[in-house]
Image: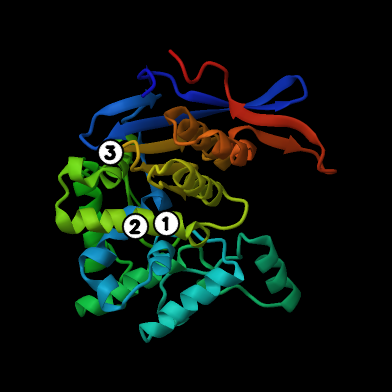
Amino acid sequence: MTKSIHSPNPAIIEVTRGTLVESRHRVHAVVADATGTIVHAWGDGELEIFPRSAIKPLQTLALIETGAADHWRLTDERIALATASHSASAAHIMAVEAWLDDIGRGEDDLECGAHMPTDETAAHRLIKQGAAPTRLHNNCSGKHTGFLATALHMGEDIHGYTDADHPVQQRLYQALMDMGGAALSGTGRGVDGCGIPVYGMPLSALARAMAKMADPAKAGLGAVRSAAAQRIVQSMAKHNFMVSGRGRLDHAAMTAGIGVAKRTGAPVFATKTGAEAVHAAILPGLGLGVAVKAEDGTKRASDSMMANVLNFLGAFDDGARVDMAPFLEMTVVNAEGKPVGAVRPQAGWDRL
């Protein structure tokens, strides 16, 4: 393990154009272990954030722990889909439709709104067809299908499953507190893009929750939750396209992690993005959890920081670093696609 860093200042992600640093992003980041110890920190580890979709691995725990996953005989691909912020490619939409059909439900039962696919091919196809996006295209439709599957298995009313007082959401709220180790009763409240409640939590709590999933035995999670956490990480890594989509950091990082596992025997790891530049990682081989938040909500900043933190921690070998080069130092291009600058951490961020 590299020397511990505890910097009171956020890391700076700089955006260059030619010889000038044109823009700078302030990024807070925390690395924790399964005992709750903060191993590394940049900026304010107690910064209260809405963790958004970065907590989908935690939200998937109930799908397995309630017995719903076994009841519906869910494949690992569907477990991955439950954690997804997918790009709504054709493969994603077909997978959600098939899962809904298997539980006897349809698109109208989803309580997430509709938005255009982030997958450009899928978006262009809809536009060319003159068709409107549906709830299936919502990046959270896999998660919502998991909510429906859990509620149906538990014999709960599926209507209003996004309400804060519904048992589906109450289980998620309890999991956030249990895993993060922070009381959330007095924190911020809001509504996520897909309609479910969001709860303010310290950035450090998000890192600790991810660390517990990375090393459930050391965290003392117990047999049921430990098995659920391990299955979620394995499913995300194995079916990482279902978690995200083409050209995205989560897909690239987890694919690189599979390469490392094949070459070295190290365990696979999982990463998960969230809206407003939140990002989390679960690193079983290191027993660590990572949480990142860019103050200004810019995704290029959180992607850059997460990729470089993973490299800093030793999650990548030489082969993975080659694969991850487009994220370790992103290229800024002009309208002709010619390189004109870069997005990268400011020099010195990785040392005291």
Q: Position of residue 220 (x, y in %)?
A: 15, 45
Whether residue 296 is visible here, answered yes or no, is: no
Q: Residue at x 17, y 59 (%)?
A: 224
Quarter of the image where one finds residue 223: bottom left
Quick one: SS at disc 1? Answer: helix
Q: Which of marks 3 and 1 is in front?
A: 1
Q: In the picture provided, is 224 more to the left or to the right than 206?
A: left
N-terminal-most mark, 3 or 1: 3
Q: Residue at x 56, y 33 (%)?
A: 318
Q: Position of residue 295 (x, y in %)?
A: 48, 33
Q: Which of 32 and 318 is in front in this view?
A: 318
Q: Is residue 233 above or below residue 151?
A: above
Q: Position of residue 180 (x, y in %)?
A: 24, 43
Alpha-carbon neighbours of circle 1 within 10 Å: few (<14), some, or many (≥20)?
A: many
Assess whether mark 1 and mark 3 are in contact (beta carbons under 8 angstroms).
Answer: no
> Which quarter of the image is occupied by the C terminus?
top left
Quick one: SS at disc 3? Answer: helix
Where is mark 3, residue-wise?
A: 208
| Residue 236, numbered circle | 1
Q: In this view, does 324 lie above or below 252?
A: above
| Residue 232, numbered circle | 2
Give the CA separation, mark 2 to mark 1. Answer: 6 Å
Q: Where is residue 13 in the image (x, y as percent from the top left)?
A: 57, 27
Q: Residue at x 45, y 68 (%)?
A: 141
Q: Which of marks 3 and 2 is in front?
A: 2
Q: Is residue 106 above or below residue 350?
A: below
Quick one: SS at disc 2? Answer: helix
Assess whether mark 1 and mark 2 are in contact (beta carbons under 8 angstroms).
Answer: yes
Give the CA separation, mark 3 to mark 2. Answer: 17 Å
The amino acid marked with disc number 2 is Ile
